[in-house]
């Protein structure tokens, strides 16, 4: 449904996102990468909110910048979704539906009620937004993005700052959307990706470094992941940038480390997870935080 060909963006001669090509079909994709990796730039390019320096993004053969009809097929939820705090959820969604030019007033009202039910806000729909929790505001942001039944939904950090119950509720809403749409989920919470996404895209330093199945990420840590119980003295000497996890035990510290060679005579090879592979990949990139 959504594809990008040689899509890239430059600012003052420097690539914020080097040209990349990808194709996204129905389902949920996790977008991963450290701060400054180019994730926000990619999302804004795919949503048609930013003019590319090269290439284009298309939905079913039409450029995302070709007109309002195509833009209605895209739902975009920024990380910091904002609305008028004095409005209720129902009032806000009616306002946005009118701005988008969705059908008649009767059709708009029906769409608003459908989406309030989808994001589980019907019971609170007539309360001012200033009384909403962070999770409710984020669900409302998703609802307004879904007005007009877009075929592509792009969501930036939807679960940041939410409690576990609200995170699960929001992930379930997105998972249901992915049954009929392309959902691109940008997040730093790897557990959200692991529980919801079959495919992932990894950016770093403005470049595409991986696109594929979630399970394939573990490959980047194969043969480089070590685990052993270190003494307190040995643990303090371990280079902290290589340390993935450390857990105190009765006799020392259980360490999990990424390294090309065993970091200790007692270290044994461990089976990597998706998170281990992602951290190994990101850790191998030069100057990850320099952009």
Image: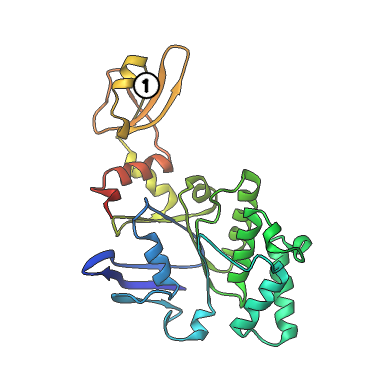
- Image vertical order of residue 65 relative to residue 38, above or below: below
Q: Residue at x 42, y 42 (%)?
A: 275
Residue 190 location (% of width, % of height): 47, 46
The one of 268 and 164 positioned closer to us in this rendering: 164
Which residue does the image show at 32% across and 73% down from the upper left?
A: 5
**Closest to the observer, 57 or 102:** 102
Q: How many marks?
A: 1
Residue closest to the far front: 86
Left of 61 or right of it: where is 261?
Answer: left
Residue 80, above or below 161: below
Q: Position of residue 125 (x, y in %)?
A: 75, 65
Q: Position of residue 237 (x, y in %)?
A: 28, 21
**Residue 59 horizontal side relative to residue 143, left or right:** left
Q: Secondary structure at mark 1?
A: strand
- Residue at 72 percent across and 83 percent down: it is 107
- Res 271 seen here: yes
From the viewer's side, name the closer residue of 183 and 126.
126
Residue placed under numbered mark 1 in the picture:
228
Residue drawn 64% across the image and 79% down it: 97
Q: Nearer the viewer, residue 139 or 73?
A: 139
Decide: few, some or many residues near mark 1? Use Cα within 10 Å; few <14, some 14-19, many ≥20. many
| Residue 28 appears left or right of 98 | left
- Please tell me whether residue 282 is drawn above or below residue 226 in the rendered image: below
Q: Residue furthest left?
A: 13
The part of the image, by quadrant, that contains residue 108 is bottom right
| Res. 283 image quadrant | top left
């Amino acid at each position: 449904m959504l594809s990008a060909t040689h899509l890239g963006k430059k600012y003052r001669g420097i690539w914020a996102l080097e040209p990349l090509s990808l194709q996204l079909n129905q389902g949920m994709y996790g977008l991963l990468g450290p701060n400054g990796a180019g994730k926000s730039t990619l999302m804004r390019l795919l949503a048609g909110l930013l003019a590319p320096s090269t290439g284009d993004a298309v939905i079913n053969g039409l450029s995302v910048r070709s007109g309002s009809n195509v833009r209605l097929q895209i739902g975009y939820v920024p990380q910091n979704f904002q609305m008028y705090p004095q409005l209720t959820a129902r009032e806000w969604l009616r306002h946005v539906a009118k701005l988008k030019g969705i059908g008649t007033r009767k059709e708009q009202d029906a769409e608003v009620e459908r989406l309030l039910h989808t994001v589980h806000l019907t019971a609170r729909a007539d309360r001012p937004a200033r009384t909403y929790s962070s999770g409710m505001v984020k669900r409302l942001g998703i609802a307004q993005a879904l007005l007009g039944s877009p075929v592509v939904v792009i969501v930036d950090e939807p679960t940041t700052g939410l409690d576990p119950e609200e995170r699960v509720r929001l992930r379930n809403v997105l998972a249901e959307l992915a049954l009929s749409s392309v959902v691109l989920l940008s997040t730093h919470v790897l557990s959200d990706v692991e529980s919801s996404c079959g495919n992932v895209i990894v950016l770093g330093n403005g470049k595409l470094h991986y696109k594929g199945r979630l399970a394939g990420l573990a490959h980047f840590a194969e043969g480089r992941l070590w685990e052993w119980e270190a003494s307190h003295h040995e643990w303090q000497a371990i280079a902290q940038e290589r340390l993935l996890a450390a857990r105190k035990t009765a006799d020392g510290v259980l360490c999990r480390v990424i390294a090309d060679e065993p970091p200790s005579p007692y270290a044994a090879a461990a089976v990597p997870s998706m998170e281990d592979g992602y951290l190994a990949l990101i850790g191998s990139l030069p100057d990850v935080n320099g952009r």
